[in-house]
């Protein structure tokens, strides 16, 4: 018999544990604080020590227990140790959010093999490592649970100036879809989270490649993200809603819904629009 997915509702969240990668900044930090405000215990990791310590302090001030580890998500041993420590401290983990991610902006011929390796090791291997580290115990405990993989709308509709980044995010969406079916008998839901333009430090950390991608363009794009004003706090709210509803794919922000809809209903038009958007600020 296949049991239905055990929904991660408010009550389960309030008595449960959430593990988040890349919790020292942006979406990961906002989600950690929201989960803490809703009563959850937190297992958090990042390579950004300062940001991670700041998140942990704020989680504690909200009254929640928190475990932190410096973990490079591309390192499977560090991730395994993080999961081991989380289960040792909290017994079970109800929600794993594979959120850590990085970006490279530039055309295909301007993107180096090193860039590809860096992107894939974090954006894809990071999600694989997080899932492999936490899933065996989650399955063995038989309590169900949820995995939320933070992809992007660029994983639903490719942006030609973010080709390498888009390819990692398409991979995360594909992996999430496959895992969702595979984990259903274990009552573990899987959601691919696909945000649009979110005002976080990501644009400041994005590696720029190619002639038109200068620091001037970075400043213009950062200004567009700021003006758009969609906050990581709103993303965090929407992630928890999508997890609660056990959504397979969760576009977040209006532009993500529009781009997702257009990519399915009018793919040629969507690709044309994505091409136009790729030259914004050049
Ligand atoms: P951010 O830069 O604010 O946060 C990313 C965090 O990941 C940082 O704290 C960083 O230190 C951490 N990180 C980077 N490499 C790591 C590694 N190897 N190991 C562990 N941690 C690492 O960016 P954000 O916008 O909050 O991004 C979070 C996720 O959302 C990413 O996967 C990103 O691709 C995705 N996303 C962001 C946007 C956006 O517009 N901001 C849109 C779509 C998707």
Image (cartoon, grey):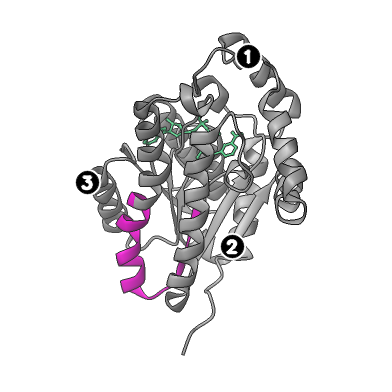
Which residue is tagged 3? 77
Marks 2 and 3, how far apart at CA: 29 Å
Residue 239, percent from left and from top:
60, 51
The residue segment tinted magenta is 129-148
Which residue is tagged 2? 248
Does dot 2 land on a helix, a strand or a loop? Answer: loop
Does dot 1 land on a helix, a strand or a loop? Answer: helix
**In front of the other: label 2 or label 3?**
2
Instruction: Please report the residue visible at 68 percent of the width from the left and 23 percent of the height from the top.
Output: 279
Which residue is tagged 1? 217
The disc, 2 or 3, on the residue closer to the chain's N-terminal end is 3
Instruction: Please report the residue visible at 32 percent of the width from the left and 57 percent of the height from the top.
Output: 132
> Does any atom of ligand 1 lie closer than 8 Å to the CB of label 1?
no
Left or right: 6, with 182 as reference point: right
Prevailing secondary structure class for the magenta stretch in the rendered image: helix
The disc, 3 or 1, on the residue closer to the chain's N-terminal end is 3
- In this orientation, which residue lies closer to the viewer: 248 or 14? 248
Marks 3 and 1, how far apart at CA: 38 Å
Q: Quadrant of the C terminus?
A: top right
């Amino acid at each position: 018999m296949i049991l239905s997915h055990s929904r991660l509702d408010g009550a389960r969240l309030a008595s449960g544990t959430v593990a988040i990668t890349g919790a020292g900044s942006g979406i990961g930090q906002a989600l950690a604080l929201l989960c803490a405000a809703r009563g959850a215990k937190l297992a958090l990791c990042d390579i950004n020590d300062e940001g991670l310590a700041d998140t942990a302090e704020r989680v504690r001030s909200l009254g929640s227990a928190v475990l932190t580890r410096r973990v490079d998500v591309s390192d499977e041993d560090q991730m395994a140790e993080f999961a081991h420590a989380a289960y040792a401290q909290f017994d079970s983990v109800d929600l794993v959010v594979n959120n850590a991610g990085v970006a490279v902006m530039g055309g295909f011929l301007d993107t180096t093999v090193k860039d590809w390796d860096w992107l894939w090791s974090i954006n894809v291997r990071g999600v694989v490592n997080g899932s492999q580290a936490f899933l065996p115990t989650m399955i063995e405990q038989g309590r169900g649970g949820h995995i939320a993989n933070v992809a992007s709308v660029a994983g639903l509709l490719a942006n030609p100036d973010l080709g390498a980044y888009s390819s990692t995010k398409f991979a995360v969406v594909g992996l999430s879809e496959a895992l969702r079916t595979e984990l259903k008998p274990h009552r573990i839901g899987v959601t691919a989270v696909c945000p649009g333009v979110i005002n976080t430090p990501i644009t400041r950390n994005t590696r720029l490649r190619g002639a038109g991608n200068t620091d001037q363009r970075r400043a213009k794009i950062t200004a567009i993200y700021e003006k758009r004003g969609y906050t990581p706090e709103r993303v965090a709210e929407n992630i928890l809603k999508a997890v609660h509803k056990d959504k397979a794919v969760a576009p977040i922000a209006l532009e993500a819904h529009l781009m997702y809809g257009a990519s399915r209903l009018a793919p040629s038009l969507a690709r044309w629009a994505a091409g136009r958007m790729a030259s914004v600020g050049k």
